[in-house]
Amino acid sequence: MASSAAAAGLLHLVDTHAHLDEEAFDGDRAEVVARAETAGIVRIITIGTTADTSQSAVDIASQFPSVFAAVGIQPNYVAQAKAGDWEAIVTLASAEKVVAIGETGLDRYWDYAPFDLQVDYFQRHIALSQRLDKPFVVHCREAEAETVAQLQEASRRGPLRGVMHSFTGGLETARACLDLGLYISLAGMVTFKKSQALRDLIGQLPLDRVLVETDSPYLAPQPVRGKRNEPLNVRMTANMVAELAGISQDEFARQTTANAGRLFGLGLDSPAS
């Protein structure tokens, strides 16, 4: 499908964060992937949030050449983790087509899990990332200072490779994460009119550390807001961010695709066909 996209003049993009295992995709998952490929989305990373969904992410990645997986236990689910779940993540982390660890992180908005348990699992994920030299994916909601503090602590063990997923934080947080070696990923919220503070931040981010994502089936960008999101819609977000950054859509697509390939080792010199 990537070849047909190239023939149509569509520049390649990568959706660095989707949840293709979600029930919302059960009826047409293959068609969703095919639509994305036809639209020039050459890679999709489907993200686990529990041991079970991480296994599903690995299984889905095995079915589609353009799909890769991340495995982990999201902070809102750590209190539900059963005996053996973390060990399952450790095993899955070395599976074929697993390119990242997570999503992990901290969440004070929902507060479904004790905060000290969230911290424990966050550090476990980062340590696994460091041991395997695979990037980690950070979920952060109303816990910016705490997340930065935990990242700084982890950096004392060794270099960090990771991404702040669906970033909505402030400039201070962005700079702290960039200083630690992380990337910043932008999702559909940047297209919302209410997100002016986030929009104002775009011009201050180094373009070689920016990624785009859908977080589908959630966070559909403004033109399709309220509908089920899917990976092909990452182009809407990319086009908006390019405009805010003051560069062409072509340049932005090339840069963010190169960024994703570099961080996740996606083999983008030979896009999936």
Image (cartoon, rainbow, N blue to C red):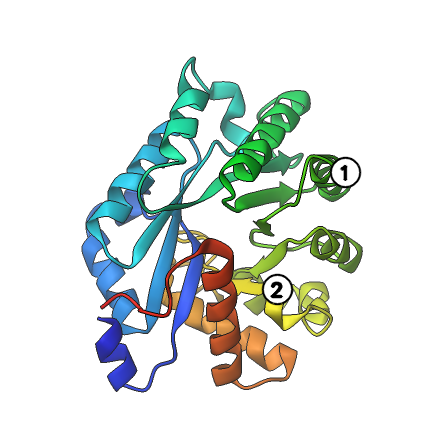
> Residue 212 placed where, x, y %?
51, 63
> Residue 35 placed where, x, y %?
25, 67
- Residue at the disc numbered 2: 209
Task: Give left or right: position of 258 versus 230.
Answer: right
- Label 1 sits on a secondary structure element that is helix
Residue at 64% over, 37% down: 109
Residue 228 seen from this side = no
- Residue at the disc numbered 1: 149
Residue at 56% over, 68% down: 191
Q: Amino acid at mark 1?
A: Ala
Sequence-first tag of 2 and 1: 1
Task: Give left or right: position of 34 versus 168.
Answer: left
> Residue 240 placed where, x, y %?
54, 75
Q: Amino acid at mark 2?
A: Arg
> Residue 14 placed where, x, y %?
41, 64
Q: Considering only vertical position in the picture, is 150 above or below 112?
A: below
Q: Residues within 10 Å of mark 2 (few under 14, many from 20)?
A: some
Q: Nearer the viewer, residue 182 or 9?
A: 182
Which image quadrant: the C terminus?
bottom left
Q: Residues within 10 Å of mark 1 (few under 14, many from 20)?
A: few
Q: Which mark is residue 163?
A: none
The image quadrant of residue 2 is bottom left
Q: Considering only vertical position in the picture, is 1 above or below 144?
A: below
Residue 89 seen from this side = yes
Residue at 64% over, 84% down: 246
The answer to whether mark 2 and mark 1 are in CB contact below 8 A is no
Residue at 67% over, 34% down: 108
